[in-house]
Image (tube, rainbow, N blue to C red):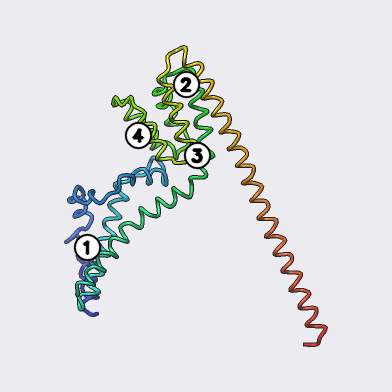
């Protein structure tokens, strides 16, 4: 145990005196560490913290924390360094490395309900802009005004379209990033709206508008139900507290009458 304490203190002193630098080591080898980076990590970071967040800084902090965990675990088990313990060290370090990603992914899944409510109003913006612009131009104009959680996906979609991808794939990728009800169907309609000529566009725009209006009505109904459920929960809580208080008072009255 003394060796472990001395080792940790030595590492801290060397890091403090800049004799060694974990930040510099990570920066110099970041290209190698990127092999461990998840494909959707940048998307989850921006969905959680907004467009101003830098995924590279957060990824570097993940690597740094997992390396520190690896070294500390190694020092703790240095006196009993078996093959099983080596596996345990790697597993714990990997768990620490993945914990932030899993947290971001969990946050995103919890907010799918919010995305489901916001999507119809974003599509309404697209409907209005599509009356005056082509679909790629309309998408690019919504990037800065759309709900913040949609912006990373919109940027990726418009980049692929501008790079020459005229297939449905960029639209489907956006739908996969936001896997809420009707997202795939609405992205297909949006893609077809972009393919139609001037004569067909009017009819397709009417169809798109009807679908958007139906989704908006569903979103309003869902928000109303959410508010109603929230009010019911508060009412039940108040009734429970009141009932519990009355029961306690009755119990105290009975106890006092019995002379305890």
- N-terminal of the pair, mark 4 or mark 1, is 1
Q: CA distance from mark 3 to mark 1?
A: 51 Å
Q: Report which residue position mark 4 lands on.
A: 156
Q: CA distance from mark 4 to mark 1?
A: 39 Å
Q: Quadrant of residue 54?
A: top left
- N-terminal of the pair, mark 3 or mark 1, is 1
Q: Quadrant of residue 174?
A: top left
Q: Report which residue position mark 1 lands on.
A: 15
Q: Residue at x 35, y 53 (%)?
A: 101
Instruction: Name the disc covering residue 130, or none.
Output: 2
Q: Secondary structure at mark 4?
A: helix
Q: Which numbered disc, 3 or 1, marks the residue closer to the eye?
A: 3
Instruction: Name the disc covering residue 92, or none.
Output: none
Q: Secondary structure at mark 1?
A: helix
- Residue 70 percent location from the top left of the image: 24, 65
Asked if residue 227 is positioned above or below residue 94 in the image, the reply reads above
Asked if residue 18 is positioned above or below residue 7 in the image, the reply reads above
Q: Residue at x 54, y 39 (%)?
A: 117
Looking at the rendered image, the quarter that the C terminus falls into is bottom right
- N-terminal of the pair, mark 3 or mark 2, is 2
Asked if labels 4 and 3 touch by Cβ distance under 8 angstroms, the answer is: no
Q: Residues within 10 Å of mark 4 (few under 14, many from 20)?
A: some
Q: CA distance from mark 4 to mark 2?
A: 19 Å
- Residue 185 percent location from the top left of the image: 47, 32
Query: Looking at this rendering, what residue extends furthest in the right direction?
Result: 257
Q: Nearer the viewer, residue 81 or 146?
A: 81
Q: Which numbered disc, 1 or 2, marks the residue closer to the eye?
A: 2
Q: Report which residue position mark 3 lands on.
A: 181
């Amino acid at each position: 145990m003394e060796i472990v304490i001395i080792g940790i203190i030595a590492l801290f002193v060397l890091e403090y005196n800049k004799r060694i630098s974990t930040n510099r080591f990570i920066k110099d080898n970041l290209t190698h560490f990127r092999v461990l980076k998840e494909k959707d990590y940048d998307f989850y970071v921006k969905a959680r913290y907004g467009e101003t967040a830098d995924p590279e800084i957060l990824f570097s902090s993940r690597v740094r924390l997992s390396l520190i965990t690896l070294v500390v675990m190694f020092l703790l088990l240095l006196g009993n360094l078996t093959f099983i313990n080596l596996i345990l060290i790697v597993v714990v370090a990997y768990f620490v490395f993945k914990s932030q990603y899993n947290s971001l992914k969990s946050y995103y899944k919890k907010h799918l309900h919010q995305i489901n409510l916001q999507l119809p109003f974003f599509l309404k913006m697209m409907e209005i802009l599509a009356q005056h612009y082509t679909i790629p131009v309309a998408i690019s104009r919504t990037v800065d005004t759309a709900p913040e959680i949609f912006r990373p996906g919109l940027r990726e979609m418009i980049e692929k379209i501008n790079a020459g991808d005229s297939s449905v794939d960029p639209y489907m990728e956006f739908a996969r990033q936001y896997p809420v009800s009707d997202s795939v169907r609405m992205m297909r309609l949006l893609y077809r709206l972009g393919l139609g000529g001037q004569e067909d566009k009017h009819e397709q725009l009417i169809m798109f508008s009807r679908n958007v209006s139906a989704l908006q009505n569903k979103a309003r109904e869902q928000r109303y139900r959410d508010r109603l459920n929230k009010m019911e929960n508060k009412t039940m809580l108040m009734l429970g507290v009141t009932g519990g208080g009355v029961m306690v008072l009755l119990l105290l009255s009975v106890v006092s009458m019995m002379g305890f």
